[in-house]
Image: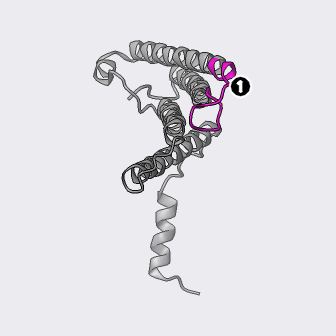
């Protein structure tokens, strides 16, 4: 049986193309984090769209839209920021890092990741304290706990810790180019 020239070209292309690295568990967690942030952003559009329609078209502004918006905004911000830590797409002074020597850059990149992990730990710790503190208080306008917006803050902070420590270890061990 003879091969179709198109099949032969495709077979050669498969042999020449290096395999992409397999996603790690942290890559999958980061992808899930982005998915949650995306759904929260879509939810914001829907809730705010309903708020505008209800207020200006039917002249009956719902009370639940503001508290739900706060929860969705906290989720989008926290999970998006955590994923940004994992992918290295966050604020940084990349030109300064590129001007450093390899050892200096490795040290600075490791310290940066430790600082990000510390910030994430503060967000996770205090977010959890505030979440637990207000669970028995109801939000004005919605039948939700008043402290619900702190849940994504606590979870996002914990993810920031995990992602930053993993990046710090990878940078220190030379398995990653560091920030930028």
Count of labels in the image: 1
Q: Residue at x 38, y 56 (%)?
A: 57
Q: Quadrant of the C terminus?
A: top left
Please name the residue that numbered disc 1 is placed on.
136
The residue nearer to you, when weighing 131 against 175, is: 131
Q: Report x, y in % for residue 178.
A: 44, 25
Left or right: 91, with 23 as reference point: left
Q: Residue at x 33, y 15 (%)?
A: 100
- Residue most extreme to the bottom: 1
Q: Is residue 20 above or below residue 159?
A: below
Q: Quadrant of the N terminus?
A: bottom right
Q: Is residue 154 above or below residue 52?
A: above
Main secondary structure of the magenta stretch:
loop
The range drawn in magenta is 130-147
Q: Is residue 79 above or below residue 117?
A: below
Q: Is residue 19 magenta?
A: no
The residue nearer to you, when weighing 155 against 103, is: 155
Q: Is residue 29 above or below residue 17?
A: above
Binning the other alpha carbons within 10 Å of mark 1 as few (below 14), some (14 to 19) or many (20 upward) gives few
Q: Residue at x 52, y 16 (%)?
A: 119
The residue nearer to you, when weighing 121 against 39, is: 39
Q: Report x, y in % for residue 146.
A: 61, 28
Q: Is residue 131 magenta?
A: yes
Q: Report x, y in % for residue 9.
A: 45, 72
- Residue most extreme to the front: 59
Q: Report x, y in % for residue 153.
A: 56, 27
Quadrant position of residue 170: top right
Secondary structure at numbered mark 1: loop
């Amino acid at each position: 049986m003879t091969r179709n020239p198109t099949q032969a070209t495709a077979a050669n292309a498969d042999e020449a193309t290096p395999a992409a690295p397999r996603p790690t568990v942290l890559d999958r967690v980061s992808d899930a984090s982005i998915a949650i942030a995306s759904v929260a952003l879509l939810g914001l559009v829907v809730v705010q769209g309903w708020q505008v329609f209800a207020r200006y078209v039917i002249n009956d502004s719902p009370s639940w839209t503001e508290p739900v918006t706060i929860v969705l905004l906290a989720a989008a911000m926290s999970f998006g920021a955590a994923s940004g830590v994992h992918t290295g797409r966050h604020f940084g002074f990349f030109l300064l890092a590129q001007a450093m020597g390899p050892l200096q850059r490795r040290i600075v990149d490791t310290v940066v990741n430790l600082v990000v992990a510390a910030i994430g730990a503060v967000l996770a710790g205090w977010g959890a304290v505030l979440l637990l503190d207000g669970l028995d208080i109801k939000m004005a306008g919605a039948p939700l706990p008043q402290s619900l917006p702190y849940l994504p803050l606590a979870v996002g902070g914990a993810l920031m810790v995990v992602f930053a420590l993993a990046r710090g270890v990878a940078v220190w061990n030379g398995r990653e180019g560091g920030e930028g």
